[in-house]
Amino acid sequence: MNAAVVVINAGSSSVKFALWTARAEDAELLLKGEISGIGRSPHFMAHDAAGKILADRTWDAADGGQEALFRRLLDWIDEHAAGGKLVAAGHRVVHGGSRFTAPVVIDARVIRELEDLIPLAPLHQPHNLLAIRSLATAHPGLPQVACFDTAFHAARADTAMRFALPREMHDAGIRRYGFHGLSYESIARSLARLAPDLARGRVVVAHLGNGASLCAMRRGMSVDTTMSFTALDGLPMGTRCGSIDAGVLLFLLDKGMTNEALRLLLYQQSGLLGVSGGISGDMRDLLASKLPEAAQAVDLFVYRAVREIGGMAACLGGLDGLVFTAGIGERAPIIRERICHGLAWLGIALDPAANARGEGCITAPTSRVSAWVIPTDEARMIAQHTVAALGDASGDIPNSATAGKAPVTAIKQSVIA
């Protein structure tokens, strides 16, 4: 029976999962799915690699909480693993801070340090940690690995990571970390396969979705990125504001806004949703709307993307290629078209037919800078990192029945404490 790893991407009300073959390179997808509606009426759906539906059912919301959901999920995977034996779990963890710059096998110390980072990623980190704890309770013999969205950016130059604040604040961890690193690493690997010459050059990757950011890469390595200390910075997003004058925040606090109200404003009431006057934070809804507020939100998104891509190109000293990925980047040809037209001065000449197809290179043969649409695959990266991390820790993939007992026991103890 082949070894397999489960990849977990946990949010506030849903958990996405995928089962992959346990290979450090060329992992193969076995199945994937999602538990949505957690806390209300959990709905479980899964399909195999070919898209065939394997499960589509609603679970009892009162049946034991998230630990029970994970127990059900793992029992289901054991029954439907297509010949794969579950040996480990890999988690997407949004913030690794300055301590975690590579995937790490999870133990009690790791849990404590990740808890300290919750204020830096309040929308994501608590749910990532809850999934780790719940999985440890549901399957205490299963080794777990944390893979970080910040790690890909950890090797950038000091000047790209500093704020213009006193040095002791930087030394204390107040710095520009960057996010979406698993996505960017996935794109860097795909580009090396699709266009190896371009991958060795100067490329800006636009991860455009409900969360949106840019990454300037040289030779497949991060040079700079638009998100920074938290996932609020940079481009406007579905409900997040993006870059904002810190004086605005001081003004609102002076006017009596509480910290919690300010956090709600910046993370959940701003971005496309706020600019559109509450129409939607979903680009699909805004593009379908005839209301001027919706058009204004789209205009702002495009304008800021064009402006920031220009800044990323300046960091690289020029541009050889632009890659679109994530929900908007992969599925909104009109947004790609408008951004590329705004960057015509850089030498981008769009091929309208190729852009409409949304596959591979979408620029004309005469374009000095090529533009691409490449799907991101964060789950594959997590699966491969999980295998590599466990191999580094033990010399081989652990046996799920025996390995990982000590770190998982430590996780459970830390939860009780």
Image: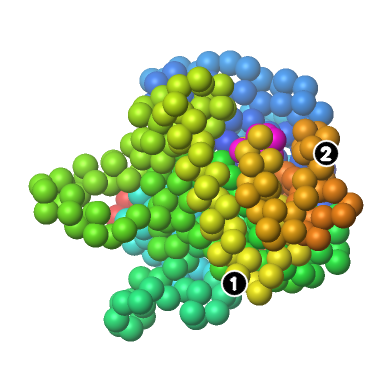
Q: How is the image coloured?
A: rainbow
Q: Tell me if mark 2 has few (under 14), some (14-19) or many (20+) residues whose alpha carbon lies within 10 angstroms of its own.
A: some
How far across and down, in percent of the image, does residue 304 sit?
50, 50
Q: Tell me if mark 1 has few (under 14), some (14-19) or many (20+) residues whose alpha carbon lies within 10 angstroms of its own.
A: some
Q: Which residue is mark 2?
A: 354
* Camera-side residue of 405 and 341: 341
Sequence-wise, which precedes: disc 1 or disc 2?
1
Lateral position of residue 12 relative to residue 265, left or right = right
* Camera-side residue of 190 and 293: 293
Q: Single out the residue that lies furthest toward the front.
A: 345
> Main structural element of the magenta stretch: helix, strand or loop?
helix
User: Could you tell me which quadrant the N terminus lies in?
Assistant: top right
How far apart marks 1 and 2 lie (CA) works out to 28 Å
How far across and down, in percent of the image, does residue 378 sit?
65, 49
Q: Which residue is mark 1?
A: 315
Residue 337 showing in the rendered view: yes
As for residue 17 lying within the magenta part, the answer is no
Q: What amino acid does circle 1 point to?
A: Cys
Q: Is residue 162 above or below residue 375?
A: below
Identified at 89% across, 52% down, the residue is 365
The residue tagged with tag 1: helix, strand or loop? Answer: helix
Specify start and end residues of the magenta stretch as a single range.
328-333
Residue 404 showing in the rendered view: no
How far across and down, in percent of the image, does residue 63 sit?
42, 22
Lateral position of residue 292 relative to residue 361, left or right = left
Identified at 36% across, 44% down, the residue is 267
Q: Is residue 414 above or below residue 200?
A: above
How far across and down, in percent of the image, does residue 282 sit?
50, 30
Identified at 77% across, 26% down, the residue is 51
The residue tagged with tag 2: helix, strand or loop? Answer: helix
Q: Single out the residue that lies furthest toward the right.
A: 365
